Amino acid sequence: MMKPFRTELYLNPGFQIRHEQPILTLGSCFAEHIGQRLLDFKWGGLNAPFGTLFHPLALEKLLRICVDGSTLDSSLFVEHDGSFFHYELHSRFHGESREILQNQWQETSELVANCLQQTPLILITLGTSFVYELQGSGVVVANCHKQPAALFRKRLLSSNEIRSSLENITKILPEGTRILCSLSPVRHIRDTIVANSVSKSLLRVALHEWSLENPDRVEYFPAYECVMDDLRDYRFYDEDMIHPNGQAIAYIWEKFTESYVTQDVREFMKRWQVVRDCLKHLPQRMEAPSYQVFLRRVLRDLDAWQHIDVIAERGELEARLV
């Protein structure tokens, strides 16, 4: 008998999610990929409202501000190329003045605070144990915003710092909120391949201990292992040989849905995919009878889904009727 050509991961999830449960995603760009797919399949919640953040200290700070209703540290605003940024925020937050930037953040902070009171599940993906500190103050920043390297000191977080930050996140979040944590499979090779391995290993151990110490709240999803041990081939990477490509992300999404999504929701997702394909497909002749019949059939299917908002999809499909 021929031996298998790969070592496939089999998951044993501790819970499953339903469609009416809003989900909040936080952390690296990998979390954003999964979050976008959740939105595509009509889950409620927020996808990466903080932007891309790689280490736990950055997430901890912003979550605390959202929950406490406090304001950003006024000493950490920075101006670059005519725009204002903040060292604790991703570069998606910027404005022509401090006030505009502060208002942008305040809107996001209120959205996150409201979402935290509603969502039973938060997806957190961490990417690196390396952080940058402002020289002099020692403040750990979330983003350097293209400021001179001489302003910062790069260092590796200790295992105790990572564990402490993760425990603080547990305490900040509403009691009873589940956390599905993962390690980003994106390699930070600018830290060097060797240092990236050290960085990832510190996070992996911390996430393992976090889940063991909080078994009723924290569970680990092996996105990192799916890429490194299951797929384990450069054909599953983008041209930069660093980021997993669409095929790899689709595979991890499949593993996620098979494990954590209820059977009835998976059936809905198959039907909803037909709607998504219809929206993406534009025939050569919009008035073709077969396409018009297909449009009307899809519109009838939309009538059956009372629990989701299909106004935008319905409007786009109806605009194609002749």
Image: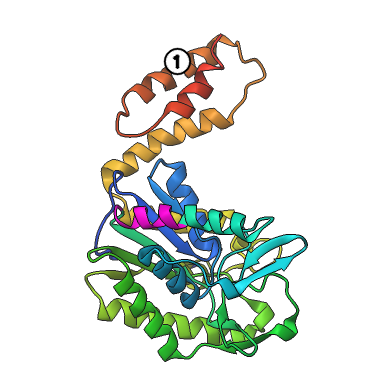
Q: Residue drawn 27% across and 80% down? A: 212
Residue 312 vertical position relative to residue 201 in the rendered view, above or below: above
Asked if the stretch drawn in magenta spans residue 117, the answer is: yes
Q: Can I make out residue 66 in this image?
A: yes
Colour mode of the rendering: rainbow
Residue 275 vertical position relative to residue 18 in the rendered view, above or below: above
Q: Main secondary structure of the magenta part?
A: helix
The N terminus lies in which quarter of the figure? Answer: bottom left
Left or right side of 204 for 286: right
Q: Which residue is mark 1?
A: 296
Q: Magenta region: which residues?
A: 109-118
Q: Nearer the viewer, residue 6 or 143?
A: 143
Q: Residue lying furthest right in this view?
A: 81
Picture quadrant where residue 143 is located = bottom right
Q: Nearer the viewer, residue 166 or 220?
A: 166
Expressed as whole percent of the image width and height from the top left, the position of residue 175 reads 23, 66
Q: Residue drawn 56% across and 88% down? A: 156
The C terminus lies in which quarter of the figure? Answer: top right
Expressed as whole percent of the image width and height from the top left, the position of residue 237 reads 63, 63
Amino acid carrying label 1: it is Arg
Expressed as whole percent of the image width and height from the top left, the position of residue 79 reads 71, 67
Instruction: Name the secondary structure under disc 1.
Output: helix
Density class for disc 1 (Cα within 10 Å; few <14, some 14-19, many ≥20) is: some
